[in-house]
């Protein structure tokens, strides 16, 4: 494998993130200005992000150095363990080898601090006092809240109202480390007030919460905005997962034939897969890459690959991605982190290029997989991570049918300790599958902008 050793320090921590833009045969289509429809440049993004992150967003350098201040925090929980799921293999009676990378050992319990820490660091470097963000289930908000407290930056979180009401512990976690949490839609922004006027009992969506956060950040010269997924620089930061996995598998004398990840906005999936896809693009071994999304929010399998707005109020740039439409509000299924209407443009581009196989799974299959995994391996996965577990189990059972011995790697992107109500509901038979009908897809897609189609 190329240069992996060179990229690890004495603590086996990557010294640089991997940027897949360097190895793409064609670049993804550019982001467009939400009003003019013209390609945007770094200056357009300056009110929202620190320049260091904007430069990472558009960079085509293969390796981007991880600052020592960031690595010194990563060291608290990185490298994360790579486990062989031997008891799960036995329970499935499969000839496949199953490995999983466990991101639940971070202080926030998921992969999100991998990007929250560098984002807070670069904002601090550029004198930003306040970061405004949104959160769905609360994993991103709690990760950024922690990073803010480490770097001395105030954090304001617009939290999707249904989660704000149903997940008081997540809110407490953010407030405990000093963040301000506001239920979205809120009366504090034009975007929020507009939604409340038309839909007073709106339970919110990520698209609405993003609009509120972007509006506040853009108007405050001391503030910037932060996103926990979707964007190139976020995916870049997450590649520590796959870079470590490459080195760890090399130590184990193995290499994956299949990699499975859960996709919401695409960041944990990109984190584990991009270093392997990159190796393949540079002439290395072939790997099957499987993306698993919820059937109730099927952007990759039922959405359209088109330009769409990143948020409901159409203030964020338009990007070309697999989208269900920026007005999409998903049904109440439990994987809160997988409810975004679109997919990362970079992941979408790689799907179009044929490097990723998207699949959708129903909620009940994912929870059944999570329970089977808990019983075998002793770790309770986050409902989002259950999609990766279920995908890996499907592949392992396929190996059992065909008698093929394959090496499967998946990303266990977080633990489910704050999601036990969902497991209780599952065991009590209160969870249901949601099919997203073709009529609903058509309706949500009707509002797509008519640019660059
Ligand atoms: C946020 C989150 C996700 C979804 O985001 P991606 O960018 O697709 O990774 C998935 N799993 C967990 C545990 C999360 O916290």
Image (cartoon, rainbow, N blue to C red):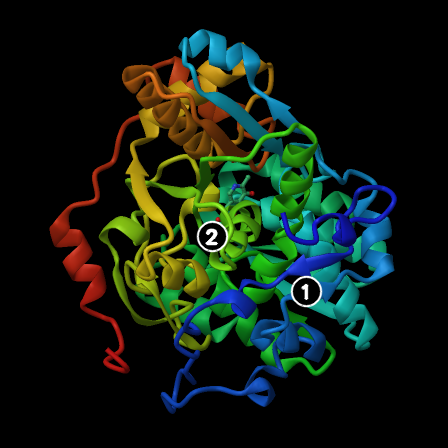
Q: Is residue 44 above or below residue 311?
A: below
* Closer-to-camera residue (168/47): 47
Q: Left or right: where does residue 360 sit relative to residue 182?
A: left
Instruction: Tell me which residue sits at (41%, 13%) in the image.
Output: 94
Q: Is residue 318 above or below residue 131?
A: below
Q: Which residue is mark 1?
A: 63
| Label 2 lies in ligand 1 vicinity (Cβ under 8 Å) | yes
Instruction: Tell me which residue sits at (84%, 54%) in the image.
Output: 150
Is the C terminus in the top left, top right, bottom left or bottom right quadrant? bottom left
Camera-nearest label, 2 or 1: 1
Q: Give the quarter of the image for residue 406.
A: top left
Q: Which residue is mark 2?
A: 266
* Closer-to-camera residue (400/119): 400
Q: Give the quarter of the image for residue 221.
A: bottom right
Element type where label 2 sits in the image: loop
Q: Give the quarter of the image for residue 426.
A: top left
Q: Whole-Å distance between the Cαs marked 2 and 1?
A: 20 Å
* Closer-to-camera residue (113/224): 113
The x, y position of residue 235, in whole percent, is 56, 58
The x, y position of residue 430, in whole percent, is 33, 20
Q: Left or right: where does residue 260 sit relative to residue 450?
A: right
Residue extending furthest toward the front: 283
Instruction: Tell me which residue sits at (73%, 59%) in the image.
Output: 16
Mark yes or no: residue 272 visible: yes
The x, y position of residue 35, in whole percent, is 39, 87
Q: Left or right: where does residue 449 sit relative to residue 389?
A: left
């Amino acid at each position: 494998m190329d240069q992996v050793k060179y990229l690890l320090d004495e603590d086996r921590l990557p010294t640089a993130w991997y940027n897949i833009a360097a190895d793409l045969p064609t670049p993804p289509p550019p982001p467009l200005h939400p009003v003019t429809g013209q390609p945007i440049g770094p200056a357009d993004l300056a009110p929202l992000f620190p320049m260091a992150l904007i430069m990472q967003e558009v960079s085509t350098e293969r390796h981007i150095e991880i600052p020592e201040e960031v690595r010194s925090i990563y060291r608290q929980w990185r490298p994360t363990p790579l486990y062989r799921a031997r008891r799960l293999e036995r329970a499935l009676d499969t000839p496949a080898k199953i490995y999983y990378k466990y991101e639940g050992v971070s202080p926030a319990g998921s992969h999100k601090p991998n990007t929250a820490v560098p984002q807070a660091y670069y904002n601090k470097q550029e004198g930003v006092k306040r970061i405004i963000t949104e959160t769905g289930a609360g994993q991103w908000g709690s990760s950024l809240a922690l990073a803010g407290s480490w770097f001395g930056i105030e954090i304001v979180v617009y939290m999707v109202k249904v989660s704000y009401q149903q997940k008081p512990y997540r809110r407490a976690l953010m407030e405990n480390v000093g963040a301000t949490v506001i239920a979205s839609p809120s009366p504090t922004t034009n975007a929020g007030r507009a939604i409340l006027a038309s839909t007073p009992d709106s339970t919110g969506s990520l698209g609405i919460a993003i609009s509120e956060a972007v509006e506040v950040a853009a108007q405050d010269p001391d503030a910037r905005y932060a996103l926990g997924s979707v964007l190139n620089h976020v995916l870049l930061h997450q590649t520590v997962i796959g870079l470590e996995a490459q080195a760890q598998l090399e130590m184990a004398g193995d290499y994956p034939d299949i990699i499975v990840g859960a996709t919401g906005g695409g960041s944990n999936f990109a984190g584990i897969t991009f270093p392997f896809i990159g190796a393949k693009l540079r002439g290395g071994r072939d790997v099957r890459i499987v993306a698993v999304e919820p059937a109730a929010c099927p952007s990759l399998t039922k959405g359209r690959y088109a330009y769409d707005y990143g948020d409901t109020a159409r203030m964020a740039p338009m990007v070309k991605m697999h989208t269900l439409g920026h007005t999409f509000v998903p049904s109440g299924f439990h994987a809160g982190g997988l409810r975004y209407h679109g997919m990362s443009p970079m992941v979408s581009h790689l799907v179009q290029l044929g490097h990723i196989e998207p699949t959708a799974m129903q909620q009940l299959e994912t929870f059944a997989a999570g329970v089977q995994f808990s019983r075998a391996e002793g770790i309770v996965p986050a409902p989002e991570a259950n999609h990766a577990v279920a995908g890996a189990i499907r592949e392992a059972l396929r190996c059992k049918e065909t008698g093929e011995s394959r090496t499967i790697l998946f990303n266990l992107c977080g633990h489910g300790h704050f999601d036990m109500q969902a497991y209780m509901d599952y065991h009590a038979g209160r969870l249901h599958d949601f099919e997203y009908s073709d009529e609903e897809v058509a309706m949500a897609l009707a509002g797509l902008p008519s640019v660059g189609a």
